[in-house]
Image: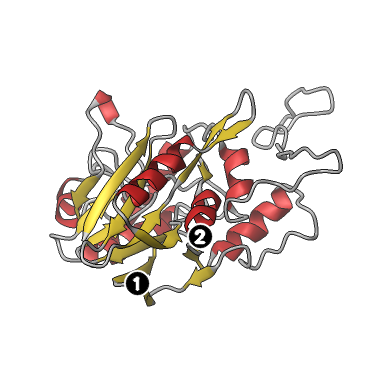
Amino acid sequence: MKIEPFFDPKTYTLTYVVWDEATRDAVVIDPVLDYEPLASQTSTESAEKVAAFLVENQLRPRFILETHAHADHLSGSQYLKRRFEAPIAIGEHITTVQQTFKELFDLSPEFKADGSQFDRLLKDGETFQAGSLRIEVIHTPGHTPACVTYRIGDAVFTGDALFIEDYGTGRCDFPRGSAEALYRSVHDRLYALPDETRVFVGHDYQPNGRPLRYETTIGASKRQNVQLRAETPKDEYVTFRQKRDATLTPPRLLFQSVQVNIDAGRLPRPHANGRRYLHLPLNLFRPTSEDGELKSS
């Protein structure tokens, strides 16, 4: 099994191509659609790099896998699906995320919160074949209720659950997020894997300006993760995570990303004038009166 990472420095996102050298069967994990918020303009530069790699190496993508509905970048899954006719898969609890954000964004009644926008919904513990690649699904909620980790061979792809040990774990302050759930996901489930299991993370924020890292191990994480080690008590982690999350600002592309990604990476349908529009809730985190003044708590 071979693994090729692609790093998007604008969102610190890592996309992976995983493939079998013998059969050329492959999967793509967490592809990026580029988005410039000032111009509200999408482009496919990042996804084209992945596509070019697939073509150059004569790989056959059997699935496009999403670890969750990302809140910091738009998904490039639809572009790759169209190019390679590869189905898009995500954890079955995406329906909970869809229901939550359908109400928040006041989406039309036509938007179905049943996961039908994706080609396959994956259950915790199931294994499936992507050609010759055998993939196990591990439900790892906490960052979102729908997060999954993919185990392929001796490697796991943890999305936003577990990062490189000098950065820690994912935030848990999004709607339906839970520090308690993330503790169980990482401590009780991922840390139960063999120490030599390779870990490929969904983001690398390069703390203190260090060079890019995208790979660690379960053993290194258990010993050295700055937020959650094997011996860290749950209450200690939950208190730390909640206190830290309270200081964080929302991701720059939160609203744009989520409403596209819960629709399997599809851009909004055009209005009658032929243009597409994103919905951006105003003053969601700090409600105001009609004239914009902060409301007293």
Mark 2, other Cα within 10 Å: few <14 / some 14–19 / many ≥20: many
Whether residue 234 sits left or right of residue 64 in the image: it is left
Residue 4 horizontal/vertical position (percent): 27, 48
Residue 292 horizontal/vertical position (percent): 78, 23
**Residue occupying image coordinates x 44% and y 47%:** 31
**Residue 184 visible within the image:** no
Residue at numbered disc 2: 145
Mark 2, secondary structure of its residue: loop
Q: Amino acid at mark 2?
A: Pro
Q: Quadrant of the N terminus?
A: bottom left
**Residue 100 visible within the image:** yes
Mark 1, other Cα within 10 Å: few <14 / some 14–19 / many ≥20: some
Q: Amino acid at mark 1?
A: Gly
Q: How is the image coloured?
A: secondary structure
The label number, if any, that marks residue 131 in the structure image: 1
Given residues 173 and 295, the one toward you in this image is 173
Given residues 276 and 225, the one toward you in this image is 276
Q: Quadrant of the C terminus?
A: top right
**Residue occupying image coordinates x 51% and y 47%:** 76
Given residues 212 and 57, the one toward you in this image is 57
- In the rendered structure, which disc, 2 or 1, sits on the residue that comes first in sequence? 1
Mark 1, secondary structure of its residue: loop
Whether residue 171 sits left or right of residue 81 in the image: it is left
* Residue 172 position (above or below residue 136): above
**Residue occupying image coordinates x 39% and y 54%:** 29
Residue 216 horizontal/vertical position (percent): 19, 48
Given residues 120 and 141, the one toward you in this image is 120
Spatial CA span between label 2 and label 1: 28 Å
The label number, if any, that marks residue 91 in the structure image: none
**Residue occupying image coordinates x 34% and y 72%:** 131
Whether residue 273 sits left or right of residue 228 in the image: it is right
* Residue 81 position (above or below residue 289): below
